[in-house]
Amino acid sequence: MSRWRAAACRISAAAASHNSAAESRALTRACANAPLLPPLPLQTLSRAFSKSAAAAAAAATTTSTATSRGPGAAAPASAGPRPEVRLNSMFLSKPCSLALPPDSPLRAADPQYEGIKRFMLTLLLFYSKQSKALRGANIVYDRITSQVDAPAIYDVFQLEKAFKTTFSLLVLHMWLVLRRLKEEGKDGVKFGQYIYEIYNHDVELRVSKAGVNLLLIKWMKELEKIFYGNIVKYDAAISPEARQDDLVNVIWRNIYAEEGSEAVDAAAAPAVQALARYTRREATCLSLTDKDAMFSGNFKFTTLLPPTPSPTPKRPTR
């Protein structure tokens, strides 16, 4: 086991601990025993972070499950049959606008006040252009995280829910939104900067929640490099000059592949190709979505799975 991995394991063990004093001592020992190492390649750092974060999350989940169930408790029952997934036929439909209809309950709107309350809020710049943009950026980012954090995206594309995959999907959807906003010129770029600042704060919280609190600034710098590197690759893969399989290869390397794996694995190929079709379709759908919907957050990414029908209650026999 390498020195870096040994230190990462100690960090993960400390993150899973519920005793703050023991956690502090473990982190101190990890820092003391981990020698200064030369900089590692970007992919190695991201995967080492992913493994340590996954170990911490798994340990925390096991502990909380055991505590909540208690001795002799039965395992939770299955949630029921899941809809059938046909990867080869998914995301082949004609692209359309992702804007929410006017009567959708998911639509967000600024509260409208009258009288003295509106006057006071106006004085406090609640209705200023920047305040409205910040509220819209928060709603847009909420649309992104709702898609990325939903279990359906992992079920459909056959992904393990770990920090690495969640972060990679988050970057992919951020790229889709920022790419669309660039079409609106300076206003879109400025609005995209608000979203990026919210994203940075959220990623920092996710890193801490994953259990990697040591060297947080260093990890954030590495994740920032991954973010910009992936965006450049996605732009090149979807450009008119790109080959048909470029996007498939980029998605494989950014989201699915382990270290040292270049060629697309045959078993994972249908899921990778489906995610590439989904990406192309969402990019086109967002281009068809009007400016007002993009700036207000009143749009929704394509639903990945149909809703599971609720079981019909049995009628009592007479």
Image (tube, rainbow, N blue to C red):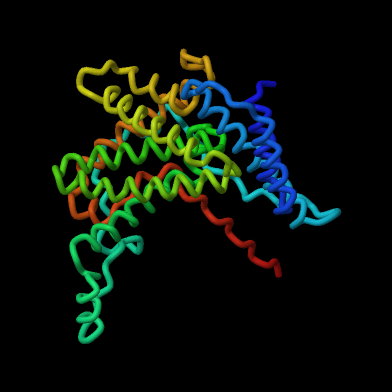
Q: Is residue 200 left or right of residue 287?
A: right
Residue extending furthest left?
Answer: 185
Q: Is residue 276 above or below residue 110?
A: above
Q: Quadrant of the N terminus?
A: top right
Res. 276 image quadrant: top left
**Residue nearest the observer in this picture, 157 or 4:** 4
Give whichever of 47, 254 is nearer the camera. 47
How many numbered markers are drawn? 0
x 69%, y 43%: residue: 14
Q: Quadrant of residue 104?
A: bottom left
The residue under the point 64% across, 65% down is: 315
With respect to residue 75, does 276 lie above or below? above
Q: Position of residue 171 (x, y in %)?
A: 39, 37
Residue situated furthest bottom in the rendering? 116
Quarter of the image containing the C terminus?
bottom right
Residue drawn at (23%, 24%), measured in percent from left and top?
239
Asked if residue 6 lies left or right of residue 49, the reply is right
| Camera-side residue of 132 and 165 | 132
